[in-house]
Image: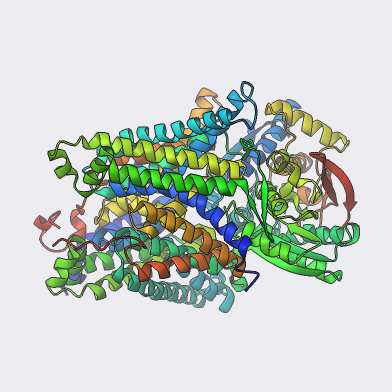
Amino acid sequence: MGSIVNTQQIINGLQVGSIYALIALGYTMVYGIVRLINFAHGDFFMLGAYAAYAAFYLFNTWFAKGSGILAFIVLLASMAAGGGVALLSNRFAYKPLRYKPKLSSLITAIGVSMFLEYFFSALPAIGPSFRAFPTVLPKRQIPIGQATISNYVVIDLAVAAILMIGLTLLVKKSSLGKAMRAVSQDKDAARLMGIDVEKVIGWTFLIGGAFAGAAGLLSGMTYPRIFPYMGIQPGLKAFIAAVLGGIGNIPGAVLGAYIMGLAETFASAYNSLLGEGIAFAILIVVLLVRPRGILGEKIADKI
Amino acid sequence: MRPYAFVAALLVFVALSAGAQEIKIGGIGPVTGEAATFGVSTKNGMTLAVEEWNAKGGVLGKKIKLVFADDKGDPAEGATVYTKLIQQDKVVALVGTVMSKVTLAGAPIAQAAKVPMISPTSTNEKVTQVGDYIFRACFIDPFQGTVGAKFAYNDLKARTAACIFDVGNDYTKGLSENFQKAFLALGGKVVAYEAHPTGTTDFKAQLTKIIQAKPDVIYCSDYYNDDALIATQARELGYTGPFVGGDGWDSADLVKIGGAAVENCFFTNHYAPDATTPAVLTFVKNYKARFKTSDAPDALAALGYDAMYIMLDAIKRAGKADGVKIKEALAKTDLAVVSGQVKFDANRNPIKAAAIIEIKGGKQVYRTTVNP
Amino acid sequence: MKHFRTPKLSLYALAFYALIMALSLTGLINGYIQHIINQSLIYVILAVSLNLINGITGQFSLGHMGFAAVGAYVSGAITTLVFKVSPEAGFAGYAVFVGGIVAGGLAAALVGVLIGFPSLRLKGDYLAIVTLGFGEIIKTVLNNIPAVGGPRGLLGIPKFSNFSFIFAAAFLTLVVIRNLVESSHGRALVSIRENELAAELAGVDTTRYKVLAFAVGAFFAGIAGGLFGHLLQIAHPTQYGFMGSVLVLIMVYTGGVGSLTGSVIAAFALTFMSEGLRIVIDSLAEATSLPIGGEWRMVIYALLLVFIMLFRTEGLMGTKEARFLVIGDPAKEGTR
């Protein structure tokens, strides 16, 4: 078993999990409050990566490469792009369908996702080809005994942890968070209590999209290759992680993401030909044992 | 009813497009979807070849019109566009498509309609076995794997090897399978044989396992986008040995993404961009000018260009835009193109040697030529 | 016998069949349009059968193409690998083909039952994940069976599927599922969608009915997969992945949840829209000499999809059925 479960593989699994966690955090927030499977979330992630790419080459003549200031500007650009487009797609594609059957907005979400992917792929300035992502921060390898860990893993882990705590505090403590929880429980009752439901949902999309954008930047740094279809797989994995953790449960999404990352890594190490299938089988078993997700609460059915 | 409106639109279009004084060649490739970058390169290659021929007066005294259709990298879509180009646009010949699985859905349609076709890049052996109208411009799976194994064993003196490939992609799996077979036959040992899922960006689970097995060489048969990440991650995990791969490595983006990690990497290719044959020089120069890029074209662009050249040359020699004549002329092809002097064997596969390219100082450098 | 009376539907179907055959024989529609019609009809089978699971019964399956994959591979293996028949073999060949398609459907139904069982415990998006996972597992399994080609796909499948076969299969699918929906079993399925707990309290064996919906839906998806394989002459794991399932899902919801008529219309409309846009783009490029090509087709497709849902939020048909699809009193139309 030493070749399958060892320090290096655990680190590998944590790295995969952190990227999933970063995307899943924004995902689960929108998902928990609007109950929309936002297929386009992975594409906000992609936009964040492209915005970071553009910002880097726009500003790298003014600031030193590898400097904190440049990294901060790049981060802002990626969050602005992700959040901005999320807000726009909410306004034009999801809001008009708010009180319609929720599956109608599922289809517009698929439509928005396809539009973003194909549009960026068709635009001559961007095109479908892979782009090398710049080294925003210098990369270092830190040896731990037999294993080695990259400083990016540490950054990804730290950012995921900070965002998770911040988001939980926001939802649990702030008045916006209180409004968010109210909207997620009952939109009509929330409105009667004087909550501007659309404003709250707008904020939710903005924050969720910005998180996706930031995840795009971190993913671009960790795996330095971006292309217009890069959001499909991570978006799907984030959806799975969010559901696995329990819909709308923020620590659950992070936990779900790490379980997926570790499951994929160990499954691939055990038998790489069947790896993906084993990982999905693990997920199914987990859901059969915990049908409402790992941290999901049992809610009584309404009759 | 929507469908009838479309049918009506289609009929009008047929009426309008009939009777032009041009020769229509169908081009197929995935220009949308996850394989789009490969499709666009191939399409650019085809377009450039057609424009060069048209500048010289076309073929058989007529202008050439490239009717290009997108297959999205999907066999179902592929079958539809092959049918469209043959039945609707009435093309005289087909150049396409990129992915073997799609070509295999289209080839029976071309064969049944007796429209000669040449696939620029479909490496699956079965493609040309569909029938005598089906040709290809690229290597087949067993060839590159075997050449890679010979190079690793004889030139790099490797005795143990590991393979890594995409489990859902027939090209990369085929190369690794054949590398393994040939490397074992030479007396080497394959110490790890690992697959990764399609579309993943993290290969460390597999690479950790590979590196624990301590191979002399890693055979990595993916496309350049994955190759660059695999090399980077392997270096991070402490692997310093060489990588060997197939023509999927060929792209200017390999070094851009992989940086120093892709040094000490070798791959089999159709041509070397630093080669000095006139065909290569003209192609690289014209490609850069036409598509306003400073990067050398990748292997897919070269093969798209070559496939179109081979097809147009055959039409010229056939003397008539007729399926049977073109097919016969294709079989007798003996033409110097970018990827070398091309002749077809009895199975309509090109006979050509493979160049081994080395990445040195961030540049692709010709290392040696290996004959099959 | 009431449920097997289908005079109007049969009449319309026969008229459609005769029209297409006549147009095809006189050369008014060429092989290309015929191919699109064939493909649309296969999507009709897929969309109608998914509608039974997602629309009528209110479950959420994201892995419908997984069932189609089972059908395609099982039937393809029977005709290509076991019996090695081709259309030239005449009646015997076609008998094997039909047998293979049915066997493919049954195998898919079996898998459907297997997936139906987890659905007993899971609801909504949790179920969606499990079906999605099953779809991916099927893909992984197919990639690892060398006998059916692994990632190369199952090649050299004989071309048995033609308009007549596909049309007959689509017609039968529609009749069977329509009859099921209109029967007392169908009421039970709808009651699960409307309120599962209430249905259970009212004495509906929800377990049995959910498995029934999955089994029947999977059976027809398997049939569609088999026909697809014998039309394209190749079955490939990637054809039946997540994106394929999403396309069928789009058809169900743009057509209208729970409306079989809507699924039929959407299957045709979206398939023709996707192909029609090729011609629109090409003509546009020709007329304006702009450097636009095939890469813009899917951009417009995606936009149209969003617009359809914005302007027909309940889908093209809502929950309504065309009159000839309703058995008995036409006044019942739209009351479900």
Where is residue C177 shown, x and y percent of the image?
A: 27, 66
Where is residue C198 shown, x and y percent of the image?
A: 14, 66
The structure residue drawn at horizontal position 48% and vertical position 57%, both measured from the top left corner, is: A258
Q: Residue furthest top?
A: A62
The structure residue drawn at horizontal position 20% and vertical position 75%, both measured from the top left corner, is: C205
| Image quadrant where residue A110 sits | top left
- Left or right for B347, reference A168: right
The structure residue drawn at horizontal position 59% and vertical position 45%, both measured from the top left corner, is: A222
Which residue is more in the foreground, C145 or A86?
A86
Q: Is residue C109 above or below residue B109?
A: below
- Left or right for A184, reference C141: left
Please state, as top left, top right, bottom left or bottom right, where the N terminus of chain B lies in the image. Answer: top left
Where is residue C148 shown, x and y percent of the image?
A: 59, 70
Q: Is residue B97 above or below residue C84?
A: above
Which residue is more in the foreground, C215 or A270?
A270
| Image quadrant where residue B149 sits | bottom right
Q: Residue furthest front?
A: A145
Where is residue A112 shown, x and y percent of the image?
A: 40, 40
Q: Is residue C61 in view from this perspective?
A: no
The structure residue drawn at horizontal position 76% and vertical position 51%, both measured from the top left corner, is: B328
Please state, as top left, top right, bottom left or bottom right, where the C terminus of chain B lies in the image. Answer: bottom right
